[in-house]
Image (spheres, rainbow, N blue to C red):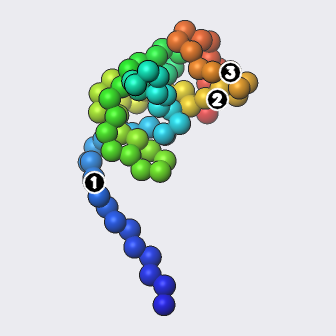
């Protein structure tokens, strides 16, 4: 007999979450790159609970903001870098 079990250790209702790959760690701080117009803007964020694919943003990010996940040309994301949004 096999059994599948899911254990919930924490739950946050109405939380803002992003893909884990959107959060960059640098010198002990966490950042995201928000798409503002046609450029990236780096924002420091405070994170909360997470799972394998998503991470909660407690502060530093508003709702319904477009967040960069990565570049298709294998260049690192950078503040002020030009972007082309692919949806």
With respect to residue 81, does 72 lie above or below? below
Q: Residue at x 61, y 29 (%)?
A: 70
Q: Secondary structure at mark 3?
A: loop
Q: Residue at x 31, y 39 (%)?
A: 48
**Marking on residue 75:** 3
Which residue, given by chain and number where applicable, does mark 2 sit on? 86
CA gap, disc 2 to disc 3? 16 Å
Q: Residue furthest bottom?
A: 1
Task: Specify which label sits upstream in the sequence, 2 or 3.
Answer: 3
Q: Secondary structure at mark 2?
A: loop
Q: What crowding class fits label 2: few (fewer than 14 Cα within 10 Å), some (14-19), or many (20 or more)?
A: few
Residue 8, quarter of picture:
bottom left
Which mark's residue is nearer the viewer, 2 or 3?
Answer: 3
Q: Residue at x 38, y 68 (%)?
A: 6
Circle 3/circle 1 CB separation < 8 Å: no
Q: Residue furthest front?
A: 27
Q: Residue furthest right?
A: 73
Q: What crowding class fits label 1: few (fewer than 14 Cα within 10 Å), some (14-19), or many (20 or more)?
A: few
Q: Secondary structure at mark 1?
A: loop
**Marking on residue 37:** none
Location of residue 61 in the rendering, given as x and y in whole percent from the top left corner: 36, 25
Which residue, given by chain and number where applicable, does mark 1 sit on? 10
Which mark's residue is nearer the viewer, 2 or 1?
Answer: 1
With respect to residue 25, does 54 lie above or below? below
Task: Specify which label sits upstream in the sequence, 3 or 1.
Answer: 1
With respect to residue 36, does 55 lie above or below? below
């Amino acid at each position: 007999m096999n059994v599948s079990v899911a254990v919930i250790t924490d739950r946050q209702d109405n939380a803002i979450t992003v893909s884990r790959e959107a959060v960059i760690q640098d010198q002990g701080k966490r950042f995201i790159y928000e798409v503002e117009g046609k450029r990236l803007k780096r924002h420091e964020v405070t994170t909360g609970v997470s799972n394998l694919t998503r991470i909660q943003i407690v502060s530093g990010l508003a709702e319904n903001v477009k967040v960069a996940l990565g570049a298709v040309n294998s260049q690192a994301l950078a503040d002020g870098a030009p972007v082309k949004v692919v949806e």
